[in-house]
């Protein structure tokens, strides 16, 4: 892909894990172990495409880094944090983060979210001054990521919070097969356990809301998981 990503986290194990997975995706990786080092790297390397930002870091925490960054840049930022309280998530998003991933995380889910944000920002025009809203468009569906609204043509489709997260995952990665574990951990925001019935019920409800043709958007890939159809 050729994009350069800065991982700012004081845990070397986290940086090493993300580097391993992201380099396989073709990204170039920079690292920072504290907030001040992260800001220096952003200033030194002007072509960083995304910042993966831990909150609890020495010298400057992630919230301060994000505040300073947002004064002069709309660079995509994904927060990586062990802080699970809703007020921490809300604060991070209010300060301008594009996504929030709770530790410990599934590295495959993290890669999917990174790919999704990179695609939205650089491929779908979110970096264009005329694209004020962040939108995902697949077929006749449009997902407004700022307003958390799904439209089919002009019709608004009401979604639960779990259904919305699944549509974000699917529409951000059309054509990609997701396992039940990946779907559950992204949609329900908790560690996977045997919850196949929950997933099946949620997918069934989504299909019914999207179309009378159950396979028009979300297709079951037997033995593997589910895929959102592009064509």
Image (cartoon, rainbow, N blue to C red):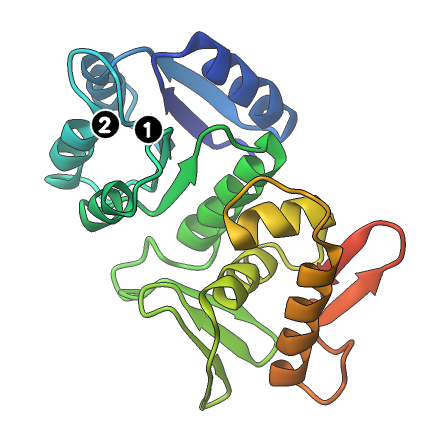
Q: Nearer the viewer, residue 109 or 125?
A: 109
Q: Nearer the viewer, residue 173 or 201?
A: 201
Choose top left, top right, bottom left or bottom right for residue 198.
bottom right
Contact flag, marks 1 and 2 (Cβ < 8 Å): yes
Residue 94 in the image, given as x and y percentages of width and height = 20, 50
Residue 103 in the image, given as x and y percentages of width and height = 45, 30
List the residue tagged with mark 1.
53
Q: CA distance from mark 1 to mark 2?
A: 6 Å
- Quarter of the picture containing the N terminus is top right
Residue 195 in the image, given as x and y percentages of width and height = 70, 52
User: Viewed as shown, does residue 124 lie left or right of 134?
Assistant: right
Residue that appears at 73% across and 65% down: 200
Q: Residues within 10 Å of mark 2 (few under 14, many from 20)?
A: many
- Quarter of the picture containing the C terminus is bottom right
Tell me the SS state at disc 2.
helix
Residue that appears at 41% across and 17% down: 30
Residue that appears at 57% across and 43% down: 112
- Lower position in the chain sequence, tag 1 or tag 2: 1
Where 107 falls versus 11 (above or below)? below
């Amino acid at each position: 892909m050729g994009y350069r990503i800065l991982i700012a986290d004081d845990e070397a194990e986290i940086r090493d894990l993300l580097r391993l997975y992201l380099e396989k995706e073709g990204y170039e990786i920079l690292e920072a172990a504290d907030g001040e080092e992260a800001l220096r790297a952003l200033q030194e390397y002007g072509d960083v495409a995304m910042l993966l930002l831990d909150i609890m870091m020495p010298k400057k925490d992630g919230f301060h880094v994000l505040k300073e960054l947002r004064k002069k840049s709309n660079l995509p930022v994904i927060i990586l944090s062990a802080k699970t309280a809703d007020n921490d998530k809300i604060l991070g998003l209010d300060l301008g983060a594009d996504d929030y991933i709770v530790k410990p995380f599934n590295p495959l889910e993290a890669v999917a979210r990174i790919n999704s944000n990179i695609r939205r920002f650089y491929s779908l025009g979110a970096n264009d001054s005329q694209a004020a809203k962040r939108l995902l468009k697949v077929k006749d569906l449009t997902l407004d990521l700022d307003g958390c609204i799904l439209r089919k043509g002009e019709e608004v489709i009401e979604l639960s919070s779990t259904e919305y997260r699944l549509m974000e995952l699917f529409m951000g990665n059309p054509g990609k097969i997701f396992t039940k574990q990946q779907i559950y951990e992204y949609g329900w925001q908790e560690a996977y356990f045997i919850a196949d019935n929950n997933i099946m019920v949620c997918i069934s409800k989504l299909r019914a809301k999207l179309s009378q043709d159950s396979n028009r958007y979300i297709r079951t890939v037997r033995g593997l998981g589910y895929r959102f159809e592009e064509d």
